[in-house]
Image: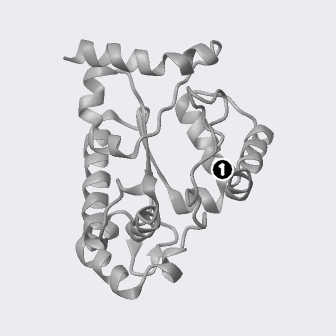
């Protein structure tokens, strides 16, 4: 089974690899992979994992915004479902990733990354084994701000169909791009429901009722 999955994965990733023959690192982003780390390791035993963690209320808010569009029917349909999905994802990823050690598993908080994008990127490049200067990191952060991506209507990620830059994202793909938008757009009752079902895990990951606590690791 692992051999067949590896064959399918290579076939899927081939357009990306062929487009960048000099590249030494391939990064693939799929949120649901947070619950599949142990299965991924059976296929790609040398894989590294970057676990991006975001406040469960921000996730619920984003999912509810996505559900308004045809492309977002995958998103959880209620605050409770979003909270349960988030809890399963973050706890599964940490449990499976922690035994790999800091050289192969790292966590980054969405809110911290937005607060100081260059510093966050510098750490992630180092984790991937890519040497970059402070100037390069600052340039990457500046050229890929949320505002610039939203104005172009594209994320700039590679697409096998669209070449080096992905085709335009669908209407509604870009929300506010801020860490605490949920405090204004997520109704109080929905915030309370997410807190009810995810509060223990939120606290474990450095969040309280008001959001990410300052100074948490």
Q: Quadrant of the N terminus?
A: top left
Q: Nearer the viewer, residue 126 or 167?
A: 167
Q: Nearer the viewer, residue 122 or 75?
A: 75
Residue 99 figure quarter: top left
Residue lying at 41% horizontally and 68% vertically, measured from the top left? 64
Relative to 105, 78 lies left or right? left
Q: Position of residue 14 (x, y in %)?
A: 49, 16
Q: In this figure, which colouring scheme has been used for the structure?
A: one colour
Residue lying at 56% horizontally and 61% vertically, measured from the top left? 172
| Residue that lies at the very extreme toward the front in this rendered image | 70
User: Does residue 101 sit above or below 155 in this rendering?
Assistant: above
Q: Nearer the viewer, residue 159 or 28?
A: 159
> Helix, strand, or loop for circle 1?
helix
Q: Nearer the viewer, residue 94 or 177?
A: 177
Q: Mark 1 Cα within 10 Å, few/some/many (few <14, many 20+)? A: some
Q: Position of residue 173 (x, y in %)?
A: 55, 56
Residue 77 figure quarter: bottom left
Count of number-bearing discs? 1
Q: Which residue is mark 1?
A: 119
| Residue that lies at the very extreme toward the bottom in this rendered image | 188
Residue 85 figure quarter: bottom left
User: Does residue 8 sit above or below 169 in this rendering?
Assistant: above
Residue lying at 65% horizontally and 46% vertically, measured from the top left? 154
Q: Position of residue 71 (x, y in %)?
A: 45, 52
Relative to 66, 74 lies left or right? left
């Amino acid at each position: 089974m692992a051999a067949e999955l590896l064959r399918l994965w290579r076939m899927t990733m081939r357009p990306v690899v062929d487009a960048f023959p000099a590249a030494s690192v391939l990064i693939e982003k799929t949120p649901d992979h947070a619950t599949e780390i142990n299965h991924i390791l059976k296929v790609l035993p040398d894989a590294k994992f970057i676990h991006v963690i975001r406040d469960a209320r921000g996730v619920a808010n984003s999912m509810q915004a996505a559900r308004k569009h045809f492309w977002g029917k995958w998103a959880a349909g209620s605050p409770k479902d979003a909270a349960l999905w988030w809890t399963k994802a973050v706890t599964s990823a940490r449990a499976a990733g922690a035994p790999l050690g800091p050289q192969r598993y790292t966590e980054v908080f969405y809110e911290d990354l937005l607060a100081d994008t260059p510093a966050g990127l510098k750490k992630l490049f180092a984790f991937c084994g890519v040497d970059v200067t402070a100037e390069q990191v600052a340039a990457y952060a500046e050229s890929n701000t949320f505002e610039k991506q939203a104005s172009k209507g594209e994320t700039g990620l590679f697409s096998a169909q669209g070449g080096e830059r992905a085709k335009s994202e669908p209407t509604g793909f870009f929300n506010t791009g801020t860490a605490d938008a949920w405090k204004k757009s997520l109704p109080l009752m929905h915030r309370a429901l997410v807190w009810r079902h995810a509060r223990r895990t939120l606290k474990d990951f450095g969040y309280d009722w008001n959001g990410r606590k300052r100074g948490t690791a």
